[in-house]
Image: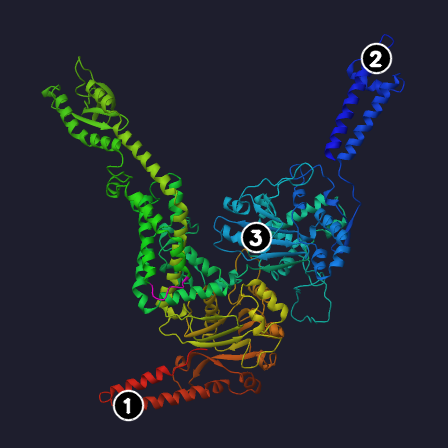
Amino acid sequence: MPVLATAINVVGLLLLAHAVYSAYEHSLLPSHPVTTRTTLLPQILNPNLDLPADITLETLIAAFLLCAGVVLASPGLKPIRWNVWAGRLERGKAAREWKGVGVGGGNPYAGLEERRSGRPLSVASSRTFGGDYQRVNAAEQHASDDFDREFNGLDEVIMAVNLTDRGTVGCAYYVARSEKLYFMEDVKLGSADTIESLKTFVDPTVILVSSKCDEQVIDRLDPEGRDDRASLDGRSTDQTRLPYLLECRPNAEFGYDSARNKLVNLRIGQQGGPRVTFVVPGDVVTEQEDHDDRDAGFVGRQGQLLRLAGWINVESHITVGCAGAVLTYLQRRRATAYLPGDEAAGAMFRVATVEMFTLRDSMFINADTLLSLQITSAESHPNAQNQGPTSKGSSSGAKEGLSVYGLFHHLAKTTQGRTLLRQYFVRPSMNLEVINERLHTISVLLRRDNTTSLDQLVDNLAKVKNMRLVTVNLHKGISSGLNKNNRVATSVWPSIRNFTYHALRLIDTLLELQGGERLGIRNKILDRFDKKQLAAVGKIITDVIDFEASKDQRHTVVLAGVDEELDEAKRTYDGIEDLLSHVASHIAEQVPAELDSKVNVIFFPQIGFLISIRLQESTGGGIFEGTDEDPWERMFATESNAYYKNSNMKEMDQYFGDIYGRICDKEIEIVQALGERVLEYDGLLNEASDICGELDSLVALARGAKLHNFCRPRVTEENVIKIKGGRHPLQELTVPAFVANDTYLVGGAGTGDDVAQFDALTSQGQAIASFYPGTQRQPADRPSTVLMTGANYSGKSVYLKQVAIIVYMAHIGSFVPADAAKIGLTDKILTRISTRESVSRIQSAFMIDLQQISLALNLATRRSLLVIDEFGKGTESYDGAGLAAGVFEHLLQRGANTPKVLGATHFHEIFEAGFLPPRDGLGFAHMEVRVDGDASELDEQITYLYNYRQAEELIVLAARGEDLVEACAELPEDELAELQDAERIARDFLEVDIHGQPREILDDLLTVANSTEDFP
């Protein structure tokens, strides 16, 4: 059809040209006035012009053929179709009527509309019916597919990502079908791999990146640099295009302030979601009243920010900026589809709700949790020289303070190992296989028969450099590192040679590791470390570089025997010193003896040979400047000497030339060739360096576990936290003795939808659904919520934090500070412990607490752990007690979806007023103290025991008004039995004759030890 249309157009143009020429000749006849070609066409169209019939007929036929060719070349016209968008009718193809302006001509969305879209629902659902039904509806499905190819905006997913120079990754994406805008917590120490994981998780149709984004991100998103532009007919001819449209937007669109203003202007949740009402003491607010936002004083920008903070973490600046870029993109799409002022534009790409999300197989952690639990902590460096921006990659000039990560980071010996270890701590995993692999590796490394192997691993890793930095320097043509004080110690060639040597030593050490046959890191090293190639790299460098001479001369020196020309030049250069002494003696004979001046002959690279003689102060020249037969040519002078050239110097310049320059040039040439040979193995070196970093991080975890007496936790799919003898890893370092305590929490059983949602975020399959079937309630001895009370300074906050830290460390794959622990997979750890106040946050401490608890309630699932410490302070006691009781009551009423909750409070009004009556799933506890009213000193009346005691009857005693001190002083039956057994053992010990029957005593001790049961 296009060929026929082209042929018809050609014939029509030829006939039209012939008709015009014939009319021009006809106008030249004597009966007509002379006509130029520029005025011919208007005269032809003039009805008063008398043209022959053949010319007129030929013109009409040419016009008809041209019209027919244009019609045949145009695509078939289709009827107007209407589709439903967010409840409103919208004309199909309305946003794409301007076919003339494709991606390259002004409309940046035409290429997007032609992209691969999701499978139509009608096609997917038709598979459940018989073949006859499919054949009957084949034509209808074909028409539906054609229409979906035209416009399928409901399947669009727009994602914006950004990676800062400090490695912080932010991401936000919009799903058109559900009208939701999703936010992610800012990810610290991210990379292009993190963005690749986000792309796989979101599966977007549009990706927006900042113009200041790293080139690695662009290369990862568009690895082949495809030209993603539509062809002239609006259809793409490149079948290998990206499955999404990649747009690089100005960095101003990713600004935090403008993005926050856009989110406020959306007025999300006006008809639902978190409601914030400002009241004053004395106002009565009932649940039945329908409060309007305007009546509640919720019309200002501050009120909208408070509402928004209940849904998302507005302190994630990079992610909020990405959300602003998404909203800007959506606004541009509306502007291209609708005229200004069109009310229907509000229904296109409407943002109805916002929601937080996290990466697959990753625990959700926000900045409040990291701060409250002291996972990482930066403090000012004590050395003033290291404060402020530094050249070591840190822009803050800070050092790691007292933190959980600080217990391990100094144990990592390599820079890549420390970086990976920090990633472990800021991004805990929910992948059970990854966690168990790390735990198993640590267990093998800590075996007693592997003590020597562990020490050898540490020694070898301490001498391993980061090969990525070394190869980058090598690519830049740098033969030494960045350390100005000791260039050779950090030079490229010793680093590569030492790396290859110690990498081979690591292979030998891992082969000697007992019980490590199934370790993933061991097998990875054995598979990826090519012994022959690593040895070849080391041999190449050793055969070329003279390391001893390089150390003495402070630059790279080539070994003798590598190049004959270089060796000859070096021998000549080494013999110049004797030659200069003979020449100086010969020239000194020409100087008169009465001048009493010493003559020297020296050699300067690039200047050549020169005569040095003492300067005469009166004349400013040398005291001798040659003879008439051989005058000296002055070159330059210093404060004491003048430098000349004579015929002898010029002769030596011509004979030897710039011999030092030739030596340097030849060495540079040889080193350049060596660098090119070594760079052939840069992939092997970089991969081996990364694997060494992974091994180093696991070794650091193992050494930390051994140093601090941690135990291996049992991580399971059960929704449970069971800890025996748990400790706070930081608190026990600051006190002489630490009292360990137990913990037992069981989360909700969950419903079918909740289990499916959790399975979508993990790689564990559907095993969890069979473990907790149904929606059963938690019995009293399996609490999901534990509410603690106790005196000030009794250890409540430390206990809450230690439980959260143990759960956190278990998901890192680390050993934990406990005697034994059984930890179920936890998707989020949400805390309301510390208040992060700042002058940039124009909010009171009480309002910040409300935002924290609101965000925690919105994000919590049955697999989450909530730690709530003293919520409700900052207001009147009864109001605070009501708030705290309301929060706990809300969590308990979730039933099968109740998260694991640890809370501490001082509000006795909760118990006295009966706000939280005893029920299944609710446990009460307190921190034990001893009160001695007879003590004479006030400080001796109260003794803090720091023991965690379950007290389910505590609320009943408080309601009766009984003496809680006396009730808490009573020992439980199990402790009383333990004390009685201890007394009996002590008395038996005193009666035993140790010297007379030692073997029997030893047998009894072994019998007791063997009868000890393992932790379930």
Q: Secondary structure at mark 1?
A: helix
**What distance separates the C-alpha of mark 2 from that of mark 1?**
142 Å
As measured in the structure, the alpha-carbon distance from the residue carrying label 2 to the one carrying label 3 is: 72 Å
Crowd tier of the residue under label 1, counting other residues whose Cα lies within 10 Å: few below 14, some 14–19, many 20 or above: few
Asked whether 518 falls inside the magenta stretch, the response is yes
Could you say where residue 82 lies in the image, as x and y percent from the top left? 78, 50
Q: Residues within 10 Å of mark 2 (few under 14, many from 20)?
A: many
Residue 470 quadrant: top left
Disc 3, SS: helix
Q: Residue at x 48, y 77 (%)?
A: 791
Is residue 872 among the parts visible in the rendering? Answer: no
Q: In this figure, which colouring scheme has been used for the structure? A: rainbow
Secondary structure of the residue carrying numbered label 2: helix
Q: Name the amino acid type tagged 1.
A: Leu
Mark sitting on residue 990? 1
* For residue 102, above or below residue 921: above
Residue bearing the label numbered 3: 199
Which-is-in-front pick, marks 2 and 3?
2
Comparing 143 with 182, the one in front is 143
Question: Which amino acid does the dot numbered 2 rest on?
Answer: Ser
Q: Which residues are magenta?
A: 513-519
Indicate the position of residue 483 as horizontal and vertical percent values.
33, 45
The mark that comes first in sequence, 2 or 1, is 2
Q: Please name which of the two marks, 2 or 1, marks the residue nearer to the observer.
A: 2
Q: Amino acid at mark 3?
A: Lys
- Residue carrying label 2: 27
Note whether residue 989 is visible.
yes
Circle 3 packing at 10 Å, graded few (<14), some (14-19), many (20+), is: some
Taking the view exactly as shown, the residue that stands out farthest to the top is 30
Q: Residue 215 in the image: x percent, y percent?
A: 51, 44
